[in-house]
Image (cartoon, rainbow, N blue to C red):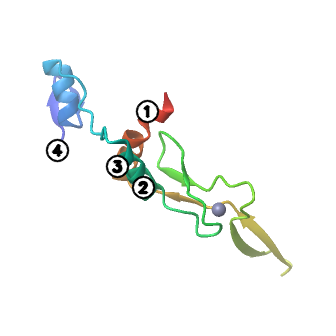
Amino acid sequence: MAKKNNGKVYYSFDEIGQELFGLKPYKRVTRDKQKLESQKEKFLGTCPHCGEPLKYVYGTNVLACNNDKCKGKETVITDATGEETTIYRPFYKMVSEKGLMIGTTIFEEEDK
Ligand SMILES: [Zn+2]
C-alpha cells in the first residue's frame, strides 16, 4: 500500500526517504566487478536460437537477441488462401516488474 502525503503518492521507502528526509538514493549494485558481471550474465541469459547472450534494452523490461546472424524464431503463417509462408521473428523476452528494477540497477553504469 502506497503512503499518501498531501495528495502525493509514494511507491517506495526510497522515495519517502529522499523526499521527506533528504536521504541519498540507496545503491543496490555490488562494487565487486566480478560479481556484477556474473549477475548480468545470469540476468540476460542466452538466445535459444543462436546461444548468444541477450542484450538488455535499458529502461525497459525487454531482453533481446542482438546477433545480426541470428534468424530468430521460425514461424509458419497461413494466409486466407491457405498459402504458407515461413517468417523469422527476432527473439526477445520480457521480464517482470522486479526484473525491470534489477535490470536498471545492474546496467546503470553502462547507460551513462
Ligand atoms: Zn539469437
Does residue 65 sit above or below 26 in this rendering?
below
In primary-sequence order, the first of circles 4 and 3 is 4
Tag 3: amino acid: Lys
Residue, x 68% and y 55% (percent of image)?
67
Q: How far apart are marks 3 and 1 (CA)?
A: 15 Å
Q: For the residues carrying marks 2 and 4, which lies nearer the camera in this image?
A: 2
Residue 82 x %, y %:
83, 81
Residue that mark 4 sits on: 1
**Image mark for residue 34:** none
Q: Marks 2 and 3: which is nearer the front?
A: 3
The spot of residue 17 in percent (x, y) is 16, 26
Q: Tell me the SS state at disc 3.
A: helix
Measure how far apart labels 2 and 1 are at the Cα level.
Answer: 16 Å
Instruction: Give the secondary structure at mark 1.
Output: helix
Q: Closer to us: mark 4 or mark 1?
A: 1
Q: Which mark is residue 43?
A: 2
CA gap between label 2 and label 3 equals 12 Å
